[in-house]
Amino acid sequence: MTPEQRRLILSMIIGGSSTGVPSDNEVLAGFGETDGSLLSARLVASAIENRSAEELDLATVVAHRFGPTPQLLHPHTSVLLEDWHHTHENIVALLDDLRSPGAIPAFVHAAVHVPDYLEFDDARALAVKAIWALGNLAVPEADEALRSLRDSESEVVRANVRKQLERHRHAPTD
């Protein structure tokens, strides 16, 4: 990723030129791409290959911009298990948007694992996001995963698991 491309992605968040936030076409043109999904997948793969925390953070911004696609499931679930970056919460949010049962093991990991850079967080925001993502999946495997977290040492985790299980119990059935 070139410095210009990094600036382009950052301008997607904060604006950065006299014209404000770039359009989708401007972002795609800046990378020589015509498809946002393909651009997202390429940037995530490159960030993982380079083990670049900065590139992964920027790639996740692009993935949010162009929307989650199934092709992002595997790389994001894999990298969620890694500790070389600081993008865990954003990845959980992206995977939550995918609503794929394939993300369940990664959500469980995020609910129990505390990366070093988040040790200060007594509110366990990463775990809470992962638990709510599990709660957003209306499949038996998600309920099973939630039940597996009921005995956590963390009261925050236990309380959020209870909320999600209760939510599922009262969810209307089709």
Image (tube, helix red, strand yellow):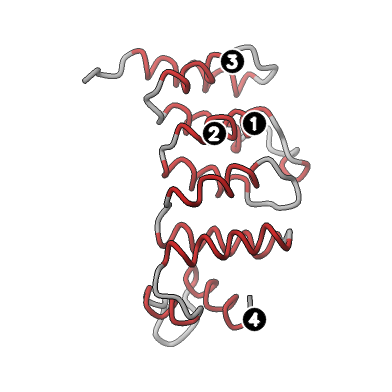
- Quick check: 54 above or below 141? below
Residue type at mark 3? Ser
* Residue to which mark 4 is pinned: 3
| 1 and 2 marks in contact (CB < 8 Å) | yes
Query: Which of the pair 174/93 is nearer the observer?
Result: 174
Residue type at mark 1? His
SS type, badge 3? helix
| 4 and 3 marks in contact (CB < 8 Å) | no
| Mark 4 or mark 2: whose residue is earlier in sequence | 4
SS type, badge 4? helix
* Residue to which mark 2 is pinned: 130
Residue type at mark 2? Ala
* Residue to which mark 3 is pinned: 148
Residue 5 occupies quadrant = bottom right
Give the Cα separation between the discs numbered 1 and 4.
Answer: 34 Å
- Quick check: 23 above or below 74? below
| Mark 4 or mark 3: whose residue is earlier in sequence | 4
Indicate left or right for 4 with 24 as reference: right
Give the Cα separation between the discs numbered 3 and 2.
Answer: 13 Å
| 4 and 2 marks in contact (CB < 8 Å) | no
SS type, badge 1? helix
| Mark 3 or mark 1: whose residue is earlier in sequence | 1
Q: Could you classify mark 2 by the number of other residues whose Cα lies within 10 Å: few (under 14), some (14-19), or many (20 or more)?
A: many
| 3 and 1 marks in contact (CB < 8 Å) | no
